[in-house]
Amino acid sequence: MKIAIASGKGGTGKTTIATNLAYIADGSGRKVQYLDCDVEEPNGHIFLKPKIKKTRAVTVDAPEVDLKKCTGCGKCGEICQYSAIVHLADNNVLTFEQLCHSCGGCLRVCPADAIKPKPLNIGDIESGTAGDIEFVQGRLRLGSIRTVSLIKEVKKHIKRDSLAIIDVPPGTSCPVVEAVKGADFVLLVTEPTPFGLNDLKLTVGLVRALHLPFAVVINRYGIGNEDAEKYCKAESVEIALKLPDDRRIARKILSIEEGASKEALKKAYRRAAFRYHPDHNPNDSDADKKFVLVNCAYELLAEDKPCEKLLEEIKSWPNFPEDDKYKLDNLWGHFLWWREKFFD
């Protein structure tokens, strides 16, 4: 069975739902695969902490023209619907690799056999295990726009005898369509905000157009209005789950029980801070994120205040952009999302 977890709006908690669903299904004895198809910014590994055993480069074909053989007929440019290959005067041909969809049409129509395929690296696929969960994720190469091609390669790892949890990219564009295509069920994760409702309507329209069964999860339930619920009721959309903000998440980060004393909190904080400090984890690219989350959890539980330290920490770093509050395509937006989701 294939379950796709989609959201439309970034930052609604899609990956939180996807990774926890994989974890719970694994605990129930199911054979589980987690496939992170959010290849532009995969972050399921932060939650599941997999051991990556294999990394494979993914390539697609792009046209390479031998100008010595080219007769200047222009047939290659005529057949290409994406203007990835253009014939100019004096038998000069330009190719635009990032526009190419690797259909091979230009190779087939060239009468002089002047066009050959050449491999274009678009990213990597990393695979391994997180406990008993089979973990697969794609990482799009910096500067590449072949998101759909890489998602197709990730989905080739799906096994028929497993429960495949597919972490879908945000939005409603081509990468999302490719990621949810063929799913047996789609969970749409939203939040009770105007932004969340706007994108929920778009994703509902998308899955209905694809004739896929689906239901909605309202994350951060209680922080906003009831418009998402009213919309689901009006559209006869099932709400499978409502997840409220909960301080138990912060306690989980520090491994502390409810009602713990301030002294116990301090000890738990020191243990966690020592464990996740970047200086002690030079090979863990996510150590800095975990360390900041530990600080946030302590401030919330011990001092009962929002995580201002998080913003101070981020803004002290170079190249901090001003208006990335709701964007998850960069490090800053990712941190801001964590702060709002768990600690405000």
Image (cartoon, rainbow, N blue to C red):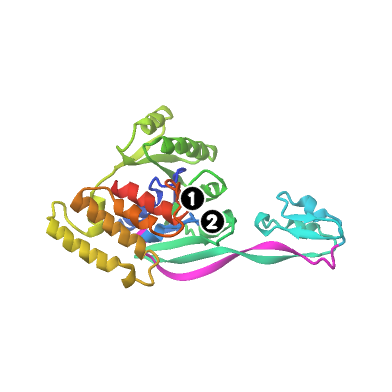
The span from disc 1 to disc 2 (Cα, nearest Å) is 10 Å
**What SS does tag 2 mark?**
helix
**What SS does tag 1 mark?**
loop
Q: In the rendering, at what x and y percent does residue 8 appear?
A: 47, 43
- Most foreground residue, 22 or 80: 80
Disc 2: CA contacts within 10 A as few (<14), some (14-19) or many (>=20): many
Is 205 above or below relative to 180? above
User: Which stretch appears magenta?
Assistant: 47-70
Is 210 above or below relative to 265? above
Q: Residue 64 in magenta? A: yes
Q: Is residue 161 visible?
A: no
Q: Amino acid at mark 1?
A: Pro
Which residue in the structure is indicated by mark 1? 169
Q: In the rendering, at what x and y percent does residue 198 appear?
A: 46, 35
Q: In the rendering, at what x and y percent does residue 27 appear?
A: 30, 58
Q: Residue 306 in magenta? A: no
Instruction: Confirm or deny contact between disc 1 and disc 2 (CB under 8 A).
Output: yes
Q: Quadrant of residue 162?
A: bottom left
Q: Is residue 136 visible?
A: yes
Determine the residue positioned at 26% across, 52% down. 249
